[in-house]
Image (spheres, helix red, strand yellow):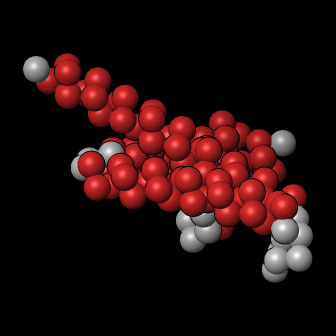
Amino acid sequence: MCGVAGSLLLLTGVALLVLPGPGLLLVLGGMLVLANGFPAAQRFVDPVERRAMQAAEESVSSPLRIAFSVGTGLVLITAGVVWWLRPNLPLGGWPTGISLILSGLILLTLLVVSHRRVKRRRQTRR
């Protein structure tokens, strides 16, 4: 069961590396699930985790990046609403709409988490 769940998370994450969504985090989640079932996969977890955390911190490293990321999240949510309400658009309908809305909400949530983490890290350095 760990193999199937981990593989699905991993494949979804790889697809989301080029599509809108938290690809690197799903790759990390898939690697963590696979490492529970297959100890040999554990050696791949640390590099992926370091890269995922680095990307999360980079996303909030400047006001311009934060503004761009927030704008992207809002655009994804708006596009999701449009695609949901306009089923005549290519791939239109609720499945596409929900996936876009969820991607935008996940992006905004991850920005908040990353911002808090970076802020905490800066406070502990002082």
The structure residue drawn at horizontal position 31% and vertical position 51%, both measured from the top left corner, is 58
Q: In which quarter of the image is residue 82?
A: bottom right
Q: Could you say which is closer to the camera, residue 107 or residue 67?
A: 67
Q: Quadrant of residue 81?
A: bottom right
Q: Could you say which is closer to the camera, residue 116 or residue 14?
A: 116
The structure residue drawn at horizontal position 54% and vertical position 38%, both measured from the top left corner, is 109
Left of 11 or right of it: where is 57? left
The structure residue drawn at horizontal position 84% and vertical position 61%, both measured from the top left corner, is 85
Q: Could you say which is closer to the camera, residue 126 or residue 49?
A: 126
Which residue is the extreme one toward the bottom? 90
Q: Where is residue 31 in the image (x, y as percent from the top left)?
A: 60, 48
Q: Position of residue 68 (x, y in %)?
A: 39, 58
Q: Which image quarter is the C terminus in? A: top left
Q: Where is residue 3 in the image (x, y as percent from the top left)?
A: 76, 49
Q: Can residue 57 be seen in this snapshot? A: yes
Q: Where is residue 99 in the image (x, y as percent from the top left)?
A: 75, 56
Count the numbered circles shown.
0
Residue 92 vertical position relative to residue 100 in the rendered view, above or below: below
Q: Can residue 46 be seen in this snapshot? A: no
Q: Quadrant of residue 122?
A: top left
Q: Which image quarter is the N terminus in? A: top right
Left of 61 or right of it: where is 10? right
